[in-house]
Amino acid sequence: MADKRIVLFCAGGMSTSLLVNKMRDAAAAAGKDYSIDAYGLGQVDEYGPDADCILLGPQVRYALKQLQGKFPGKPIDGIDMRVYGTMDGKGAVEIARKLLND
């Protein structure tokens, strides 16, 4: 079982699944055993509770405050537009690592 579970939420899932693959590669290269998956925002009640860290795609960043209220104490942040736009897996993993203090 992975050390930490990182869950990304986005509008649809296609572009985010590309980012997830790059994040998995970057985490492995950094020696981190992370479970990283992406889902549509409509699945937040299903996958949010088990996440150690939640990242939001830029297109659903508007939901940040709502999710912070729904999951108090859970580290949640949006993915920087530049990181997302360039599919920077390493940059996205760095955001998660900061949230996880890892």
Image (cartoon, grey):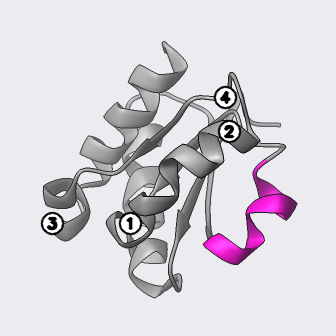
Q: Which residues are magenta?
A: 40-48
Q: Which residue bears the numbered disc 2?
A: 69
Give the SS element for disc 3.
loop
Residue located 49% across and 75% down the image: 17
In primary-sequence order, the first of circles 2 and 1 is 1
Which percent across, then down, holds residue 27?
Answer: 44, 39
Q: Which of the two marks, 2 or 3, is nearer to us in this view? A: 2
Q: CA distance from mark 2 to mark 3?
A: 30 Å
- Image quadrant where residue 53 sits: top right
Where, quadrant-wise, is the N terminus in this rendering? top right
Q: Which of the two marks, 4 or 3, is nearer to us in this view? A: 4
Q: Is residue 15 visible?
A: yes
Residue located 68% across and 22% down the image: 73
Which percent across, then down, holds residue 51?
Answer: 73, 42
Mark 4: give few (<14), some (14-19) or many (20+) Cα within 10 Å. some
Q: Amino acid at mark 1?
A: Leu
Mark 1: give few (<14), some (14-19) or many (20+) Cα within 10 Å. many
Q: Which residue bears the numbered disc 4?
A: 74
Front-lying residue, 32 or 11 = 11
Using the image, tell me which numbered label, if any, was put on residue 86.
Answer: 3
